[in-house]
Image (cartoon, rainbow, N blue to C red):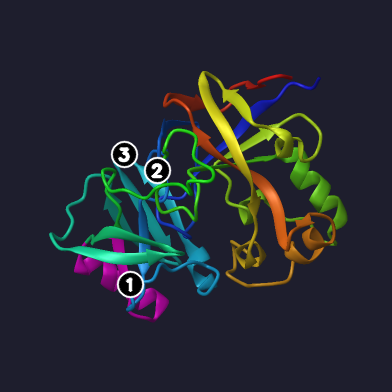
């Protein structure tokens, strides 16, 4: 059997903005440390994503000491890991969930509003605030951050290679926004996983990931197309959902490192 190895680790601190590749990351119950702990909300306190606002792809992030540098074209702003927040909580909606979030400050909200040319606010989701994973897929009553529904997403390099072999123009992995990318195994081998380890951290794969129009947004230009959903729908559709990647919860909370071996229970 081919060796399975973790090749990439990604976090997306502000939901639906650019991702950051890391050499190592702390596994926490809600997701990797700093992953989707912030988001933008509109005037109705609804969460904002590239599905409706593809220009959000143009905000790029990097880590600088204990802060994030957020760049948009030639502009940038920095956000400290330990920033202050406004005292008053906001009830924001993310899909069918209502979450308690806090606006970071007028300065940040105005900066994003100007660049997106619409009124929006940057909000923070404190670690102590609750948002349960769908009870049908919980293992130990897990919580999730501001990700769509689950704390982690894993995709195999061979799965993307198989998809790209069917496309006129190959696409990068960033269209799918995984936390973990791995080498080895057959295409879509992750579909069959249940319990497995990355290094010393144990995970349970709870469901296949249903994909949406966000995958059609070019992360370099913010342009929206029809691929990869058109091609995926021809061979990865089940019960009207297009599936690519596997959603996970963590059974324990250690550090994971690029290059860690992946061990699947029962294989």
Q: Secondary structure at mark 2?
A: loop
| Cα separation between marks 1 and 2 | 21 Å
Relative height, residue 267 to residue 34 (above, below) = above
In the rendered image, the quadrant that contains the N terminus is: top right
Taking the magenta stretch, the answer to whether it contains residue 18 is no
- Ranked by sequence position, the earlier of labels 3 and 2 is 3
Alpha carbons under labels 3 and 2: distance apart: 28 Å
Residue that label 1 marks: 45
- Quarter of the view holding residue 207: top right
Judging depth in this view, the residue of 88 and 137 nearest the camera is 137
Quarter of the image with the C terminus is top right
Q: Mark 1, residues whose alpha carbon is within 10 Å: few (<14), some, or many (≥20)?
A: some
Query: What residue is disc 3 on?
Result: 65
- For residue 175, the mark is none
Q: In the image, is 52 to the left or to the right of 81?
A: right
Q: Position of residue 52 (x, y in %)?
A: 52, 74
Q: Is residue 68 left or right of residue 196?
A: left
Label 3 environment density (alpha carbons within 10 Å; few <14, some 14–19, many ≥20): few
**Residue 143 badge:** 2
Residue pushed farthest front?
A: 136
Q: What range is drawn magenta here?
A: 105-123
């Amino acid at each position: 059997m081919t060796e399975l190895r973790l090749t990439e680790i990604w976090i997306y601190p502000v939901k639906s903005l650019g991702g950051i590749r890391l050499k190592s990351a702390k596994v926490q119950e809600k997701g990797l440390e700093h992953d989707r702990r912030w988001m933008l909300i509109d005037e109705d306190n609804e969460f904002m994503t590239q599905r409706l606002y593809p220009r959000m792809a143009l905000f790029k992030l990097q880590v600088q000491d204990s802060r994030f540098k957020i760049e948009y074209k030639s502009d940038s702003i920095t956000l400290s890991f330990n920033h202050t927040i406004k005292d008053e909580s906001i009830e924001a909606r993310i899909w069918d969930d209502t979450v308690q979030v806090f606006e970071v400050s007028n300065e940040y909200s105005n900066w994003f509003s100007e660049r997106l040319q619409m009124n929006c606010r940057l909000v923070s989701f404190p670690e102590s605030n609750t948002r349960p994973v769908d009870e049908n897929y919980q293992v130990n009553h897990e919580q999730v951050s501001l990700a769509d529904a689950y704390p982690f997403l894993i995709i195999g390099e061979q799965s993307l290679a198989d998809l790209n072999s069917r496309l006129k123009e190959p696409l990068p992995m960033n269209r799918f926004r995984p936390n973990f990318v791995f080498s080895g195994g057959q295409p879509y081998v992750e579909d069959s996983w249940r319990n497995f380890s990355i290094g010393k951290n144990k995970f349970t794969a709870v469901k296949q990931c249903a994909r949406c129009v966000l995958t059609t947004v070019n992360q370099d230009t913010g342009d929206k197309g029809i691929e990869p959903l058109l091609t995926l729908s021809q061979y990865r559709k089940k019960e009207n959902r297009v599936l690519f990647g596997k959603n996970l919860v963590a059974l324990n909370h250690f550090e994971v490192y690029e290059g860690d071996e992946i061990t699947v229970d029962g294989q």
